[in-house]
Image: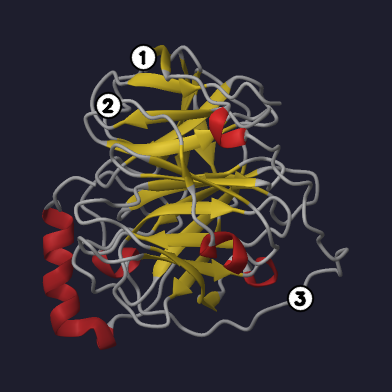
């Protein structure tokens, strides 16, 4: 993530004097002028959760194929991002409904937009989300309210100053790519509360099997990254959700987790750092046993500031993108289906 901008500095001052006096509100329009800080970081109020129709109990997906870690080839660039509006790519997700489409968002300061591009970088449209954008750090694609539909999850989860009382996720039904772009309404919003406040995070994934959402922290140098879970049945518009820890991942000094993803079957999980990629073969539904195991290292390429990773829609291959103007779209192919 880049250095904090003026909004984060102002927000730190406001929170230090008046966190307890803010009131919760919900923005109905997207502004282009400096945002109302109480809209960006309101103090949460408890929202009564509602229940959804019973769903079949999830089952563990078929295991990732044996030898997956050894089946990747060296990264290649499939193209260059054409849109100049994408200049700090911090999150990507691959569409499963619109083949060949990558969804991308910028880091803090990029506004509430998701951008569509194809795998060679052609601009397929910018879509404005009816939601604030304080520090969007990662995105995911996965199940949501309506069975059979894919949803985009935008993680407003960055916290450089380690002071936010909660972080926020925005969920929208995946739009159809269109070079003319558009505006996306119907945004579901839920706030996530850590057991102890103040964790920074740049990595998020949504389990296609259970619908649970996972956040991975970006700790201080030399500390372990922690993995927290928000259960699917609590991801309800307006809810405040208490996160529970399901794992941890030791990191060498100077190494950080900057993005994460899970493949469309739910069998494999990847984390990335600035110059590393780690992969786990999933072994349990709740991920505790999975993250207790040692991950393997898979290929990565040198990027100026790599903060985005996503599995391809049809297998275990994956894409990475760096921040910066006109970044390469880097592709690491798996030789296993």
Q: Is residue 80 above or below residue 200?
A: above
Q: Nearer the viewer, residue 265 or 198?
A: 265
Q: Secondary structure at mark 2?
A: loop
Label 3, on which residue? 51
Which mark is first along the chain, 3 or 2?
A: 3
Q: Is residue 273 left or right of residue 247?
A: left
Residues at badges 1 and 3 in contact (C-beta under 8 Å)?
A: no
Alpha-carbon span between mark 2 and mark 3: 46 Å
Residue at left 67%, top 25%? 336
Quadrant in which the C terminus appears: top right
Which mark is first along the chain, 1 or 2?
A: 1
Q: Position of residue 22 (x, y in %)?
A: 29, 81
Q: Let me know if residue 252 appears in the view.
A: yes
Label 1, on which residue? 82
Tell me the number on the disc at residue 302: 2
Which mark is first along the chain, 3 or 1?
A: 3
Mark 3 Cα within 10 Å, few/some/many (few <14, many 20+)?
few
Q: Is residue 192 left or right of residue 20?
A: right
Q: Nearer the viewer, residue 252 or 77?
A: 252
């Amino acid at each position: 993530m880049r250095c904090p901008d003026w909004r984060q500095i102002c927000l730190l001052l406001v929170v230090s004097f008046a966190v307890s006096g803010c009131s919760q509100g919900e923005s109905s329009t997207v502004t282009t002028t400096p945002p109302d800080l109480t809209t960006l970081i309101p103090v949460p109020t408890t929202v009564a959760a509602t229940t959804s129709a019973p769903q079949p109990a999830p089952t563990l997906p078929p295991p990732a194929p044996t030898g997956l870690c050894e089946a990747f080839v060296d990264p290649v660039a499939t193209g260059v991002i054409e849109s100049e509006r994408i200049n700090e790519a911090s999150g990507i997700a691959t569409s499963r409904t619109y083949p060949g489409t990558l969804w991308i968002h910028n880091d803090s300061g990029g506004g509430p937009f998701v951008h569509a591009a194809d795998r060679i970088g052609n601009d397929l449209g910018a879509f404005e989300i009816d939601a604030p954008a304080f520090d969007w750090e990662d995105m995911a694609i996965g199940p949501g309210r309506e069975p059979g539909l894919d949803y985009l999850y935008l993680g407003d989860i960055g916290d450089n100053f380690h002071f936010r009382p909660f972080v926020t996720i925005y969920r929208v039904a995946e739009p159809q790519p269109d070079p003319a772009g558009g505006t996306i309404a119907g945004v579901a919003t839920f706030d996530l509360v850590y057991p102890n406040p103040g964790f920074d995070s740049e990595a998020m994934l949504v389990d296609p099997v259970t619908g649970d959402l996972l956040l991975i922290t970006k700790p201080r140098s030399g500390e372990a990254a922690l993995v927290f879970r928000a259960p699917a049945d609590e991801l309800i518009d307006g809810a405040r959700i208490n996160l529970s820890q399901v794992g941890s991942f030791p990191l060498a000094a100077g190494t950080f987790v900057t993005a994460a993803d899970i493949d469309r079957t739910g069998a494999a999980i990847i984390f990335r750092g600035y110059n590393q990629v780690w992969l786990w073969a999933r072994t349990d539904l709740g991920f505790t046993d999975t993250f207790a195991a040692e991950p393997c290292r898979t290929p990565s390429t040198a990027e100026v500031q790599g903060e985005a990773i996503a599995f391809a829609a049809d297998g275990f291959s994956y894409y990475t993108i760096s921040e910066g103007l006109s970044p390469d779209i880097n592709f690491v192919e798996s030789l296993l289906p």
